[in-house]
Image (tube, rainbow, N blue to C red):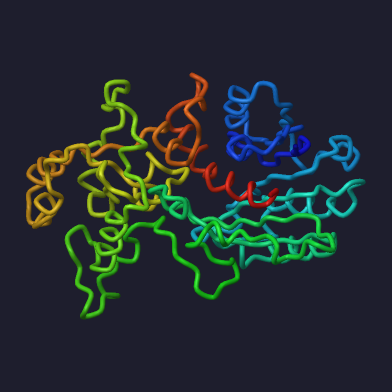
Amino acid sequence: MMETLRVLELYSGIGGMHYALKESGIPAQVVAAIDINTTANHIYTQNFPDTEQWNKTIEGITLDDFNKLSFDMILMSPPCQPFTRIGLQGDVSDPRTRSFLYILDLLPRLSKLPRYILLENVKGFEVSSARERLVKTLKECGYAFREIMVSPTSVGIPNSRLRYFLVAKISTENNCTNSLKVFDAFPQATQSDSPEQPEDSSRPDSSSCHPEDETQVERVLYKLERTADAQRKESQNNDLSFRQIQDFLEPESEVNMQHYVLPAKTLLRYSLLLDIVRPTCRRSVCFTKGYGRYVEGTGSVLQSCMETEMESVFGGLDQCSEDEKLQRLLKLKLRYFTPREIANLMGFPQNFSFPEQITTKQQYKVLGNSLNVVVVAKLLQLLVS
């Protein structure tokens, strides 16, 4: 029987890594969870009351403090803002990267190197200077490692969330880099340095907002959607290897869904930009921390009325008066996914809960900053096996 691993959880957030550890079945104890986000820490404490939590900056923790924890594994999701495609991409010059660089500086000086490391970040990290420093440090410390770009769609979950992962273990004579066979379990995934990476559909229809980019063979359909976009969505909806959205929804009898209905002004202003899915769909786009506040590229919305066809609503919509336009759109009964439903799509178990004082807006924000539990659990199993 495998001995219990002592795990250090950095940038612990709402506990996605901790849940992945539980889901993996690996005997483990989280010896400390470290984060400075007080909202996330309240949620973490409610769900893991027995785990020691440090509400402090990583740079404020000394080498001696880390050595006393005597951990076998590090799990971490460093701040992604310095690397996102829509951000400033400040990389190592961004102050939010400082704590990560501090970890890389401390790692070689630990009295005992952790046997395993798992890191998650956004697409964009794989071409950053921070990644170069990470790889250089791991090589100097004698780690074997693999990098992978993977989305929950690789494990049949109908949600796109393409992320960079690095898994590393201390190298021995019988353990070279190629022994970390993460690609066998994720056939749709790619190495992070592959020249052709799959684009995540986390910004729906963003390119189709520019008709001048269209070619003659690719006509614009209703909803500012290109033929290629529509075909890609139809293809995924017909792929039986993905589960249906309805498997992840809350029973309508248990929740007041009126709280989540899209307001009239949002429908009128942004209807052409919405990524709309039905309960029978097998796809949805990435949910970000701006979900519920911003529309474009923050996540899908659900069509509750199955009797209404989208084509009948959007066909000729631009010729309608504002009142007629609204009446048409209301027939779809569009609503936001609830925080619990997004948590379901992200693999959080049913016993995961939010403290009562955490607002819906805060729930969306922390979920958007979290990770997919099922994907990480599978990577952990492969790393430790």
Quarter of image, res 246:
top left
Picture coordinates of residue 381, whole percent (x, y)? 63, 47
Q: Residue at x 37, y 36 (%)?
A: 248
- Residues 315 and 372: in front is 372
- Above or below residue 315? Residue 374 is above
In the displayed structure, 204 sits above or below 26; it is below
Let me know if residue 125 appears in the view: yes
Q: Position of residue 352 (x, y in %)?
A: 52, 27
Residue 260 vertical placement versus 377 (above, below): above
Res. 89 visible in picture: no
Q: Which residue: 70% across, 48% down?
A: 384
Q: Give the quadrant of the N terminus.
A: top right
Residue 15 lies in quadrant: top right
x%, y% of residue 278? 25, 44
Pick whichever, 326 or 48, lies toward us. 48
Q: Is residue 327 left or right of residue 256?
A: left
Residue shown at the point (25%, 62%) measured from the top left: 230
Residue 271 placement (x, y as % from top left): 23, 49
